[in-house]
Image (cartoon, rainbow, N blue to C red):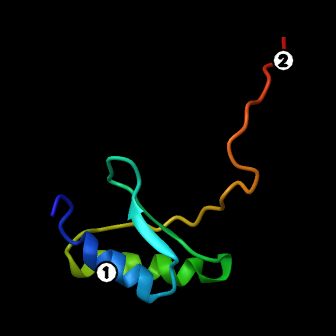
Amino acid sequence: PLVPGFRAVQAAAMGAGAEGCSFSGAGPAIFAVTAREGAASVGRAMVEAWAREGVEAVARCCTLDPRGARVEEEEA
């Protein structure tokens, strides 16, 4: 209820093949996780769902870092 339209967008992402969809932090970003080949269609489905809710949105496809979190040493 805190983000009107979120459930419709989440359902659109999942219906387009996303493995999951949720808030990113406190918002306003929402993310979906999917295989690379499905990213464009999932993003398009989410943007279209937002449009039906009267919200202008932009989809950005990003990749996950497969190595995960790590400490990087600073050069002296």
The residue sitting at 15% across, 64% down in the picture is: 1
Please, what secondary structure does the residue beneath circle 2 have? Answer: loop
| Residue 41 position within the rendered picture, expressed as x and y whole percent measured from the top left | 52, 84
Image position of 6 (left or right of 14): left
Q: Amino acid at mark 1?
A: Ala
Q: Residue furthest right?
A: 76
Query: Can you say which quadrant of the picture contains the C terminus?
Result: top right
The residue where tag 1 is placed is: 49
Left/right placement of residue 66 relative to residue 46 reads: right
Position in image of residue 51 (x %, y %): 27, 78
Crowding at mark 2 (Cα within 10 Å: few <14, some 14-19, many 20+): few
Mark 1 touches mark 2? (CB < 8 Å): no
Q: Residue at x 70, y 54 (%)?
A: 65
Quick one: 64 or 45, which is closer to the camera? 64
Q: Secondary structure at mark 1?
A: helix
Can you tell which mark lies on residue 75?
2
The front one of 73 and 51 is 73
- Residue 56 relative to residue 24: left or right: left
Residue visible at 74% across and 57% down in the picture: 66
Picture disc at residue 32: none
Q: What is the residue that sits farthest to the top in this orientation?
A: 76
Q: Amino acid at mark 2?
A: Glu
Based on the displayed image, in which of its 4 quarters is residue 12 positioned?
bottom left
The Cα–Cα distance between marks 1 and 2, rounded to whole angstroms, is 46 Å
Identify whether 12 is placed above or below 70: below
Which of marks 2 and 1 precedes in the sequence? Answer: 1
Residue at point 20%, 76% (across, down): 53
Q: Position of residue 55 (x, y in %)?
A: 24, 69
- Against 75, residue 12 (above or below) is below
Local crowd size for mark 1, using a 10 Å CA cut-off: few (<14), some (14–19), many (≥20): many
